[in-house]
Each structure stands twice: as C-alpha cells, then as structure tokens.
Image: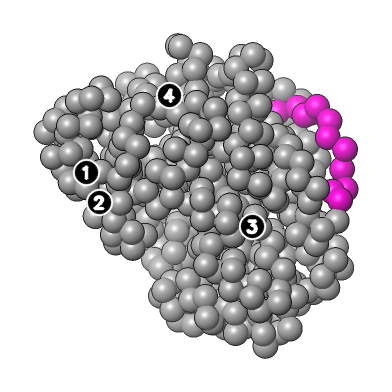
Amino acid sequence: MFESVLVANRGEIAGRILRTARAMGLKAIAVYSEADADLPFVAEADEAVLIGPADPARGYLNAAAILEAAHRTNARAVHPGDGVLAESASFARRVAERGMVWVGPPPLAVARMGDKINSRNLMKEAGVPVAPGAWEPVPDAGTAAEEAARVGYPVMLKPAAGDGGIGLAVAADERSVRAAYETARAAADRVFGHGEVLLERYVPGALHIEVQILGLADGTVLALGERDCSVQRHFQKIVEETPSPGLTPALRARMLAAAVRAGETVGYRGAGSIEFLVDPAAQEFYFLEMSTRLPSGHIVTEMVTGIDLVEQQFRIAAGEPVSFTAAEPRGHAIAFRVHAEDPHRFLPGSGEIKVWEEPVGDGIRIDAGYAEGNTVTPHYHPLIAKLSVHGADRAHAVALARAAVDAFRIEGPPTNLPFLRELLDGSEFAGGTYDTGTVARMRAGGPA
C-alpha cells in the first residue's frame, strides 16, 4: 500500500475520500483553489496545496498544477474523485508516467468508454443491450433529421464525449431534432472541446438505473447492486435509491449480469458504474454509458452493503485483495443531493452561509462540502451536500428522509431543500412509481 495520496477534487467528495485515507493511515493531501481556501475539506487534509484561482480551467482542471502539487508533497498516489479529471485518460497516463499510482481504472478503459459512440458500439459487440440509434457521429442537423426518421421518434442527442446529462436534448419531430442537434453540438464544443454528437432512441417514462461494479486486482468484476437515479432535473440526478422500487427481481438479475459483462469487456479495475435506461412497460433495458470513476451515488451502495468503496479503490490500486466478502444488501437507502439553487426553476445560487445545522440520528449520513460561515461561489457545481438515509425497508427510509430534510437548516444562499420535501410528499416518489419525467410533471402542475 502506498503511504500517501493526493485527492484531485474539491468539496464534499474530496472530504469523503480524505477521511477514508486518514482512517487507513495514509497521508491525505488536498489541492484547493483560491475560492475554496476556507472549505472544510482543506482543513481535513494532512497537507493542502493552493493550485490556482477560482477559474476551473486554471485550478481543478489544470493537470500540470495538480501534478506539480503531487511532486512537491511527494504524493505516492492520486485519487481524482468523482468528476473534474476523473475520466481523463491523458491525466491518468501522466500520473502513471510520473511514478505515482492512479486510483482508478486503466487509462485504456477510460479512453474506450469515454466516447459514448465508441462505448455504445463496443457494448453491442459484447452482447449488452443498446437502444436503436446512429452508429457514427452525427455530422450536421440534416443528418440528425434523417437518422431520427430511421430510428423513430422520440430521440435524444448528446455530446459523445460528455457525461452528467450536459448538452442532452430530446426531440419529438423533425423541427425539434434540428434544434436539439444544435444544443448538443454547442455543449460538446463548449464544455468538452469535442464536437461529436450521438443520436439514439429516447424512452419516455424510462427509469435511469446504474449498476455499481468493482473490478478487482485479479480481473474479477463484481456487481454490487443497482441505484435508481430517475429523479432528475436538467437530465442531472438529484436522488439515488437502492434497491430500485421499479425493478422486478428477474430484470435486476439480467441488468447486473450485463453490467459485469460490460466491465469484463474493457478489463475494468476499481469502482465504476454501468448506466442503463429501462423501459418498465416492456421490461427491457438499454446501455446508456459507463462512468469510469467513483460514482457520485456510491453512498447508498455503501449503506446497504457495509463496504467502504473508497477503501476498496485504494486496495485495488495497490494490487491488494479487497477487504470484504460480498453478501446480500441489507435494508433500503436513499441519497439526496442538496444544491444551492432556486427550488422552483433550479437556477444556481450563491452567497454566504449564515446558518448550517445538520440533521443527526441513526440511519442519517451527511457528506458536506460546506459549513456555516463559508461562501458558495458561482464558479462550481451548486452541490453543497449529500443527505443519505438508511432504513430497514423503503417506508422506514422515506420516513427518515422526511425528518432529515425538515431538520436540515441552511440559511443564506437558496437551496433545493423545499423541493426535496415536495418530492417526498408527492404520490409518485412516496409510492415508488417515479421515473425520469417525475420532476417535469411536478413543475407542470401534474401528478407527482
């Protein structure tokens, strides 16, 4: 096992990784921008290095600055967290070239699965179900209209190199498909620097399910259950739940087997997730993408399995065997992403946090990126905390969640806590019948 690790990320995920590192006796090193100097994760580290200004391109996305920080602190390993540079194959290679351990999958696996068109075609060859769609990048709006007519409406278009729902647009006819293409293409260029666009069939009323996989040092790939990520705004996840209330045991078993096959196909090592869209009416599922990193929803999996996935990442990266024996999940867990944003239109907010009072109690876990007195700036994603609950069954978990949301007091910037309470009171979430359209129906005034 390496004796030190640098965490190349910020906020709640950086703090979460640093805590496991310290618990394992590793020297825990943080990097931070000028805007984040007072955040909790910086104080939690054994050593912290300023890498640049608030601008992400000059800070957390500045690979050279992070590698220089690793050199200065004599870090023996680098953990990229769940975003920023986590899915950069070139960054992973540069870490290894400098003699440090990359706490993540092999760079080749990152590269092969980072392009959605390539990964889609690779999964089809491996026998993993994929939705009807284009097998090559869509070069222009006219071709998008032709492909949509062939595939059948509705369709979705998204950047081939992106993730997290950024730039994703849905079209139901030829006029809207041209606009959707331009939306996806603009995001592909602006955010990812890679203008290729993918088109495939969209499944209305779908479930968005991700399967947690863990590739072991000996080549074995395990599936550690699924998470239902269907509650989304702007095609970005707000809630993760396990087990999914929308899956039958037979469908779950098929999806877990397909996820293992996907991981084996690319020689996966470490923690990652295989994401699927599920047509609940047809009881069919389709490969969506692979997240070649620690999934942001990993907390609920940890709650029902008792496995510290970051610890296992460290052990796998060091070539050690994992420290657990797989067992059946216990109970039910739900995680909510608490954002600094308008709870009605979901527009990001900022400002000084005047009050921060966390809920406490058995079965409640808070992973916080901020504390009272900190300032939420407009430079980064509005996620400020994850609120997770674990109950004996779903009814127990939902009751815990209602109490925890009510008890979580944040004053200063706007937050989505009122929306989360509204969601918990809605008939769809309470009944476990939600899907990817639930939030849109809530905001349209329909049943939810």
Residue at numbered disc 3: 106
Q: Where residue 305 appears, x then y in whole percent?
A: 78, 36
Amino acid type shown at disc 1: Tyr
Asked whether disc 1 touches disc 2, contact meaning CB atoms under 8 Å apart, the reply is yes
- Residue drawn at point x = 22 percent, y = 29 percent: 148
Q: Looking at the image, which residue sits at the far top?
A: 281
> Magenta segment range?
321-332
Residue at numbered disc 1: 181
Q: Is residue 384 magenta?
A: no
Q: Mark 3 to mark 1: distance in Å?
A: 32 Å
- Residue drawn at point x = 37 percent, y = 48 percent: 160
Q: Residues within 10 Å of mark 1 (few under 14, many from 20)?
A: many
Q: Where residue 369 appears, x then y in whole percent?
A: 59, 61
Q: Earlier in the sequence, mark 2 or mark 3?
A: 3
Q: Please indicate whether residue 374 sits to the left or right of residue 254 in the image.
A: left
Of residue 258 and residue 154, the one placed in the foreground of this image is 258
Relative height, residue 29 to residue 149 (above, below): below
SS assignment at label 4: loop
Of residue 310 and residue 413, the one placed in the foreground of this image is 310
Q: Residues within 10 Å of mark 4 (few under 14, many from 20)?
A: some
Residue at numbered disc 2: 185
Q: Mark 4 to mark 1: distance in Å?
A: 21 Å
In this view, the mark in front (2 or 3): 3
Residue at numbered disc 4: 206
- Residue drawn at point x = 29 percent, y = 56 percent: 195
In this view, the mark in front (3 or 4): 3
Q: Earlier in the sequence, mark 2 or mark 4?
A: 2
